[in-house]
Amino acid sequence: MLSIRHIVKQYANHTALDDVSLEISKGSIFGLLGPNGAGKTSLIRIINQITAPDSGEIYFNNEKLNASHINRIGYLPEERGLYKKMEIGEQILYLAQLKGLSRHEAVKRVRYWFERLGVESWWKKKVEDLSKGMQQKIQFIATVVHQPELIILDEPFSGFDPVNAALIKDEILELNRQGATIIFSTHRMESVEQLCDHIALINQSRKILDGPLKAIRDSYRSQTFSLEYSGVLNDVTDTPLFEVKSQQVDDNGGKITVKLNEGVTPNQLLSYFIPRVTIHELHEVIPTINDIFIRKVKNLDPQAETNNIGPN
């Protein structure tokens, strides 16, 4: 769908993007991650042709990115851009027609989305009369009303309460099921784990991580397991089977986290503890995307020089 090749972008003496390349597959939900100032917004603006790169190229469905692709992209910016004193219904109709829809088709699609998101009564309201979260709903409709092939969402859940955040998440997944490719930029790592199948991390203008989400998480597996139990377990020290990472004890039992030594299996770990306590839960401890994000950005990661993980 989108091939981003060796993009460089500078502003005066600041390098926003330094040789960034990404491949975004058709039908994927792609998480574009990074701390503030990393270069994410600069890349998004280039994809939307708001600005141009100093060097490098972008291809949209194997065609060099050009003005004809604008109407096939939907962009929800982090900084919202609705006209505060214009009636909402007419505003969305206007924006839909800018994306190439006839007024008849625009009316049909806007009504569909107003009904779908439960905002039918807002047609005559003005944006300035709505809360931030309600404005966000309208901005979301403006982003998707023309049925774009590529949808770029920059912090789409900003301003939403949990109920409306869940509603928009479901709509994002449904649009993806219908064939839309989605680029999803956010600081909410739990949303990344729920939605994305592929992620890239940009830090200080350079790509430092790129790959399928599951493959990235699997690459950080360290044979660490957490076991919850009831009963009395005397202080456990390192054994030939494992190294103790932490242990918590209460009146009814406790929780112990261990790292298995090379070649040791979870079954062997269970065999050690079964004669000693009653086991309630055993699970592998795999770093979350948030943990991985922090490790990479703070250079705490032994794989810090490895950009690509798994198939692209």
Image (tube, grey):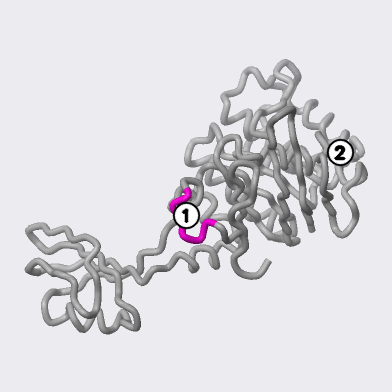
Image position of 127 with respect to 297: above or below: above
Q: What separation in Å lies between label 2 and label 1 (alpha carbons)?
A: 38 Å
List x then y, in percent, for residue 309: 59, 65
Label 1 crowd (10 A; few <14 / some 14-19 / many >=20): some
Q: Which mark is residue 292?
A: 1
Residue 92, numbered label: none
Would residue 111 be visible to someone looking at this image?
no
Q: Is residue 212 left or right of residue 297?
A: right
Instruction: Assess disc 2: are there few (<14), some (14-19) or many (≥20) residues with their C-alpha within 10 Å of its C-alpha.
Output: many
Q: Is residue 195 left or right of residue 5?
A: left
Q: Say whether residue 151 is magenta.
A: no
Report which quarter residue 246 is drawn in.
bottom left
Instruction: Give coordinates of residue 40: x percent, y percent.
Output: 65, 41
Is the C terminus in the top left, top right, bottom left or bottom right quadrant? bottom right
Q: Residue at x 87, y 59 (%)?
A: 62
Quickly name the residue at label 2.
Answer: 99
> In the shown orientation, is residue 81 left or right of residue 155?
right
x 31%, y 82%: residue? 264
Residue 242, can we see it?
yes
Residue 303 part of the magenta-drawn span: yes
Nearest to the observer: residue 133 or residue 119? 133
Q: Which of the pair 302/96 is nearer the observer?
A: 302
Q: Earlier in the sequence, mark 2 or mark 1?
A: 2
In the rendered image, the vertical position of residue 115 relative to residue 30, given as above or below = above
Q: Could you tell me which secondary element the residue under label 2 belongs to?
A: loop
Q: Which amino acid type is marked by label 1?
A: Ile
Q: Is residue 214 above or below residue 91?
A: below
Residue stretch rendered in magenta on the structure: 299-304
* Predominant SS along the magenta part: loop
